Amino acid sequence: MRMVSDHQINTQMKAILVPLVFLLSLTTHAQQKTIIRTKTELLASLKNNPNKTLINLSTYIPGITLDIRYATTNNFTHQILYTNPIPYLRKPAADALKKVQAALNKRGLRLIIYDAYRPLSVTQKIWDHVHDSRYAANPTNGSGHNRGLSVDVSIISIMGKENTGLNMGTDFDNFTDTAAHTFKKLDQQVLINRKRLKATMEKHGFKSLNTEWWHYSWPNNGGYELIDISFEEINN
Ligand SMILES: [Zn+2]
């Protein structure tokens, strides 16, 4: 009987495992990069997983305020980047945001939404302006917004005028260090406002992004694909 050394076993194991790990990483990579480009493809993907349903936050969350900047020229590009916007998030993220709204309401506050789902081609337009991965998603990878998992939000008093969020130290889409959670040279009230938003979002499962106080993401643990479909087509 031939004796096999530990070294030989290790080498044989590696010969099997290394290609296997490589193949698995390719599969994961391929899944992550799947891009849904038509309503038919979208409906097919929803059939297999109802959690992928895109929920319209404006009807799903009572009292939510919209200030969808990319549908206006009131954004850093000074261009209208999309039309007929509907603030969509995938079902689990929408459910969590509904709970955030309820928690804020108890404190006399409510959410204001700047952006939620964003077609992948719009991320390309934004990237063309910014070209800085600290502040914009590289369209090669896509972003949480393209998967219906990220939302740009602030808070506003329940009694406050529309489109006047609490003082967060900077406006939405301010691409400087001042917009970072770690930037602390701000008024005490600004720090309190940011902390209140971050604590409430994180308590309900969203992840924050250090460089942008307004950006929150739901973890992509459900195989949520990138989507590049206009609001008009989704809503059709
Ligand atoms: Zn964002």
Image (cartoon, helix red, strand yellow):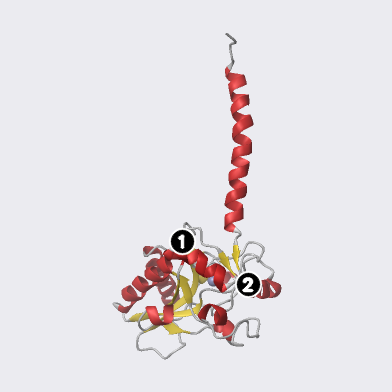
* Residues at marks 2 and 1, CA–CA distance in whole angstroms: 27 Å
Residue 16 spot, x, y in % from top left: 61, 32
Find numbered disc 2 in the image and state the secondary structure of the residue it sits on.
helix
Residue 152 spot, x, y in % from top left: 50, 74
Amino acid type, callout 2: Thr
| Image vertical order of residue 178 relative to residue 20, above or below | below
Going from N to C along the chain, the mark reached first, 2 or 1, is 1
Mark 1 neighbour density, 10 Å: few (under 14) some (14–19) many (20 or more): few
Q: Is residue 50 visible?
A: yes
Residue 229 spot, x, y in % from top left: 59, 74
Q: Is residue 182 visible?
A: no
Residue drawn at point x = 59 percent, y = 15 percent: 4
Mark 2 neighbour density, 10 Å: few (under 14) some (14–19) many (20 or more): many
Q: Which residue is mark 2?
A: 123
Q: Which residue is mark 1?
A: 48
Amino acid type, callout 1: Asn
Q: Quadrant of the N terminus?
A: top right
